[in-house]
Amino acid sequence: MKNTFKLILFSILLSWKPLYSQSGSDIIFCLDNSGSISDVAFNQMTVSTMKLMEQVLKCNRDNRVSVVHYGTDYPGMTPSVPRIYIESNFTNDLATAQTFSRRLGNGDHFHDAVSLIGAALDHYPHADIVSPQKTLDTRRPRPLVIVLFSDAERANGSLSNGSYLVNFNPPNGLHEDNAFAAFTKFKMDRNAKFIVVHVNTDQTYKEAAANIASRGGSYTGAIEQYNDDPDQNQLPRFYLNKTNFTLTNTEITELSGAICKMNTGSLEFTYQTRSCKEVTSFPLHVNGNYTIPMGASIVNFEISLLDIATSALYPTSATLNFPNPNEFEFIINQSDLTNPPSGQYKFIIEMVYSFAGNNEGIHAENSLSYLPYDFMYCQENLQIDNLPVSIPTKIKIKPTDKDYRIDLNADPNNTKSMLKEKIQQKNIQVSPNPSNGVFVVSLDKVRSGSVQVNDINGKIVFEKSFSNEKEVAVNIHSLPSNTYIVKVSSGNEIFTQKVIKR
């Protein structure tokens, strides 16, 4: 019964979503109030915005949100010109954030609305900011995320009731830099990301909206290209083209997850699983994508093999290349492998970057594989001069080869020490590994001592003594995603194991 309860509790802990440890983002939900938006459509925006708010405030307590309406008409004010209404300053209070209603009407000028948001961020109380709240207190090192809900056209109509995603004055033809000037400035100068939810069927309008959206997400269709695009006219984009403003649960999850990771690095790669026979064809190529926050710098980037059976990590000395912006490639030759025994492995890539004075680390696993392993390393792959664990007891040598006999008592590759280290590592097991930070250290013949977890800088982040226990539960769920070292001390013996926290 006790073990059953422990298993249930462990399963619950594993189901928790990790909190993002880095400083949060400032998120503006920009709602189209134009004449083409019906009350039903605005209600759909409201529900979708509230659901997104709830998720982004839940995933990171340092995130803050604000609602900004845009249109041209406001009661008691003439003439009709592009205006915005700010519901509140940035806040992480959900009740405050979700208290909003429609404020404006008529025209649709998102390009001008973005410029007015810029005035609010710069604490310039522009006359066309018609709300009591005139400014927005952002923090420059934090990413700024603007989530747009709109049915706008690219450029059509007049100043009073037109529908303009891009710059109204002067009129702009397709692919002109000036058409997208406000978005270019926001992306370059304010570290801003745009997510666009667009209800429109016209291909030209869709392409303009898709390029306003920042790089990321899952949209891979056509975009209107222009020379100054900070995202280099590359795909995919954070663009959703829909028939209404109701976001599905899947879309809510994907968008909130993307927003929550805006101020963290991202890392992903794909690799086609290979069997023993296929592994003989070196070199192996592992390709992927990464992002780091603006102002961050990469400290370390490496690929290792994770032994599925023992959870041991084997670093490699693979060559790392960056073929394109935010893309990486590891080229792995057999000589780059650090004596892994035969067995099944997963590739683990770890990236450490420095941001705001701190080192942050994340890791990635193969997002393509449908098998439990990426890389099967078999005995026939091993070379006689690079034996890691298994040494044959008998070797048949022709009499004429007497000058080339192998002295198995010699240890030129430090094999005996490696075997001893491997036997020691079997005294402790960490499972699951990788994990979300909640795992169990299983102890073999070790009956008393202490379990200690250190981060990559050697800082102790967890410590617990044990006596006559077969396993010790560890919870570092709230710590950043990274590689940690589990150290078990017992008398004069110390056993270590790497553990990856997702």
Image (tube, grey):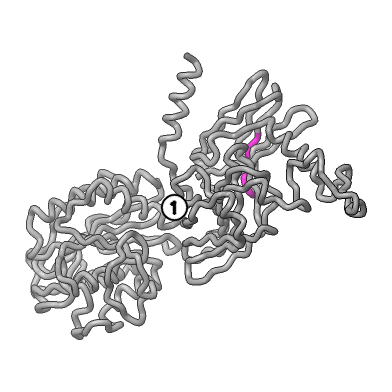
Q: Which residue is mark 1?
A: 368
Task: Tell me residue 360's x, y (percent).
Answer: 55, 53
Q: Nearer the viewer, residue 420 or 78?
A: 420
Above or below: residue 282 compared with residue 246: below
Task: Tell me residue 30's x, y (percent).
Answer: 23, 61
Q: As drawn, which residue projects farthest toward the right?
A: 403
Q: Is residue 471 visible?
A: yes
Task: Tell me residue 480's x, y (percent).
Answer: 52, 46
Local crowd size for mark 1, using a 10 Å CA cut-off: few (<14), some (14–19), many (≥20): few
| The magenta stretch spans residue 453 | yes
Q: Nearer the viewer, residue 274 or 214?
A: 274
Q: Nearer the viewer, residue 422 or 282?
A: 282
Q: Is residue 85 visible?
A: no
Q: Is residue 396 left or right of residue 54?
A: right
Q: Image quarter for residue 122?
A: bottom left
Q: Image quarter for residue 409?
A: top right
Tag 1: amino acid = Leu
Q: How many marks?
A: 1
Q: As drawn, which residue projects farthest toward the top?
A: 1
Name the residue rendered at 78%, 37% in the picture.
420
Q: As drawn, which residue projects farthest toward the front?
A: 399
Task: Tell me residue 502's x, y (percent).
Answer: 50, 45
| The magenta stretch spans residue 48 | no
Name the residue rendered at 28%, 48% in the picture.
250
Span shown in magenta: 452-457
Name the residue rendered at 56%, 32% in the picture.
474
Above or below: residue 334 compared with residue 392: below
